[in-house]
Amino acid sequence: MQSKPSESRQILFLMPMMGEQLDPRQPLKQLADTLPWSEFEEVFGKYYSPEGRPAKPVGLMVGLLLLKQMFNPGDETVVAAWVQNPYWQYFCGMREFQWQPPCDPSDLVYFRQRIGEAGMQRILKVTVQWHGDKSPETEVVVDTTVQEKNITHPTDPKLAHKIIRRCWKLADRNDVKLRRRYRKAVRHCVMAQRWRKDPKKRKAAHRALRKMKIIAGRLIRELERQWPESIPAEQRGNFALYRRVLRQQPSDRDKIYSLHEPQVYCMSKGKEHKKYEFESKVSVVMTKTHCVIVGAVAHEENLYDGDALRPALEQTRDITGQSPAKAIVDRGYRGRKCCCRANPNQDKANQ
């Protein structure tokens, strides 16, 4: 259920509202006074049910997402810093200083899932329109970057350990009594992975990894045997994902490196300090003169830069209402002559 605006209560004349105490020259306060918050309420109101417990205000959730994009903190960090920063609170629609966190960090995840990709693109479109005449330009700069995920080596032992711990939690949550939990064996297997790079202890680490996969498979099969008759569809999908992780080999293609983000892939960017990174490729489009970001597309596959140009230009056309006449790219986009055409009926973007 969408939250209703709170009724204004009488405030003592000795206690002015927070907006009157803040510096009007601060960019964050000026931005909060100009953004169309009512438009967000109207657009995202359709995602809420008319019944049930009232949810967090839409302006609060959108403000937190914008703060995350501007200052690049995590979900937990932005919620913790929000309590200490009055400008952040005013930006999110608060008119009195709050002492409590605005929401749980997981609420940001649920809100992103609620509005989906179309909702996030709508927020980007509103921010682009806010720049007025600076956003529509005939020349744009396009480049690809990566969204690095919190995934580290060694991936296979860590995934097997996570599967085992998830099986333990599922058993405790559903009152399933396991015949054996293998706590001591799992602890020794995890400790053996610390010296997997040592030539003398590499074989022991590989044996420990195989043992962890065997234990994870046993726990999955035992949960399926003792589970109630109706297994949730979500858990059936998770069990299928777990089995795929346990079957995969180091030389396989399309490997899974994360249980909560299976779409992440491994990339080699040629960096000297970091040979491989686990991330997703993103195309960013920016206007040439005023440097306004008018497009940002995340690619599910590790596309060649020349093939990633068309989706970026198509999104730019949807957001700004016009196709760029010229796209400025680096030499990584060479090799495609017609991929930059956003629409066959539109002018071709020059590389």
Image (spheres, grey):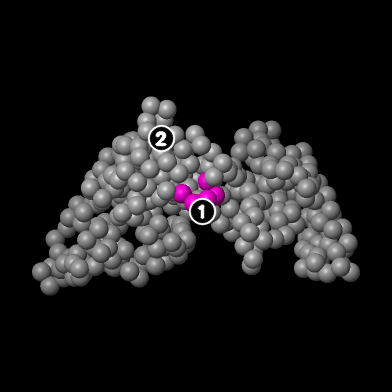
Q: Which residue is mark 1?
A: 145
Q: Residue at x 61, y 48 (%)?
A: 264
Residue 2: image location, x then y, percent? 32, 42
- Vertical placement of 40 versus 103: above or below? above
Q: Farthest residue in the left direction?
A: 13
Q: Residue at x 19, y 52 (%)?
A: 7
Q: Farthest residue in the top direction?
A: 345
- Alpha-carbon span between mark 2 and mark 1: 24 Å
Q: Main secondary structure of the magenta part?
A: helix
In which quadrant of the rendered view does residue 162 lie?
Answer: bottom right
Q: Residues within 10 Å of mark 2 (few under 14, many from 20)?
A: some
Q: Amino acid at mark 1?
A: Thr
In which quadrant of the rendered view does residue 223 lie?
Answer: top right
Badge 1 element? strand
Q: Earlier in the sequence, mark 2 or mark 1?
A: 1
Residue 80 visible? The answer is yes
Work out which quarter of the rendered image holds the C terminus and state it.
top left
Residue 164: image location, x then y, percent? 73, 53
Q: Residues within 10 Å of mark 1 (few under 14, many from 20)?
A: few
- In front: 265, or 304? 304
Q: Amino acid at mark 2?
A: Lys
Looking at the rendered structure, which numbered label has been put on residue 348? 2
- In front: 270, or 95? 270
Badge 2 element? loop
Magenta stretch in the rendered image: 329-333
Residue 57 visible? The answer is no
Q: Residue at x 19, y 64 (%)?
A: 19
